[in-house]
Amino acid sequence: MLANDHCGARRLWSRLKPLVPLLFREANPMPIKYCLWRQGLLRSPECRLPLTRISSQLAAELDHTLGQLDDVAPDRATP
């Protein structure tokens, strides 16, 4: 957007858009923290009570969606 490239911004958003509903499917901020961990930006996906880890189903969906964004997002760490 700094370059006033609205078409480029729309293309980028259209790739990121499927991720947004997944980030709010379970208690925030855990899905976001999981994504940051998968990208290597956090050391651990652990959380403090009363929060809990995300479900394995959501983790699989996030992994799949993040896998489709490899050229948009930083490299992901392996768990």
Image: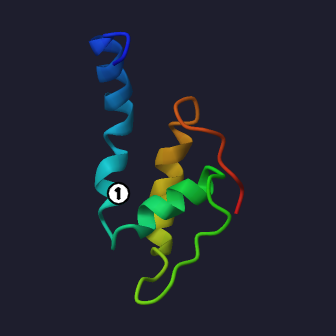
Looking at the image, what colour scheme do you see? rainbow
Q: Residue 67, image x and y in percent? A: 56, 43
Which amino acid type is marked by label 1? Answer: Leu
Q: Secondary structure at mark 1?
A: helix
> Where is 65 relative to 34, above or below?
above
Which image quadrant is residue 21 in? bottom left
Q: Residue 40, image x and y in percent? A: 66, 52
Quarter containing the N terminus: top left
Identify the residue at image location x=65%, y=47%: 76
Left or right of 25 on screen, residue 29: right
Q: Nearer the viewer, residue 75 or 57?
A: 75
Give the residue number, with chain letter if any, for mark 1. Answer: 22
Q: Residue 5, image x and y in percent? A: 33, 10
> Where is 14 relative to 27, above or below?
above
* Count of numbered badges drawn on the protein: 1
Identify the residue at image location x=30%, y=62%: 24
Which image quadrant is residue 28 in? bottom left
Q: Residues within 10 Å of mark 1 (few under 14, many from 20)?
A: some
Quarter containing the C terminus: bottom right
Q: In the image as oriented, which residue stretches furthest toward the front?
A: 2
Q: Residue 70, image x and y in percent? A: 58, 36
Q: In the image as oriented, which residue stretches furthest toward the right?
A: 78
Identify the residue at image location x=40%, y=89%: 50
Left or right of 26 on screen, residue 75: right
Q: In the image as oriented, which residue stretches furthest toward the bottom?
A: 49
Left or right of 55 on screen, residue 8: left
Identify the residue at image location x=70%, y=52%: 77
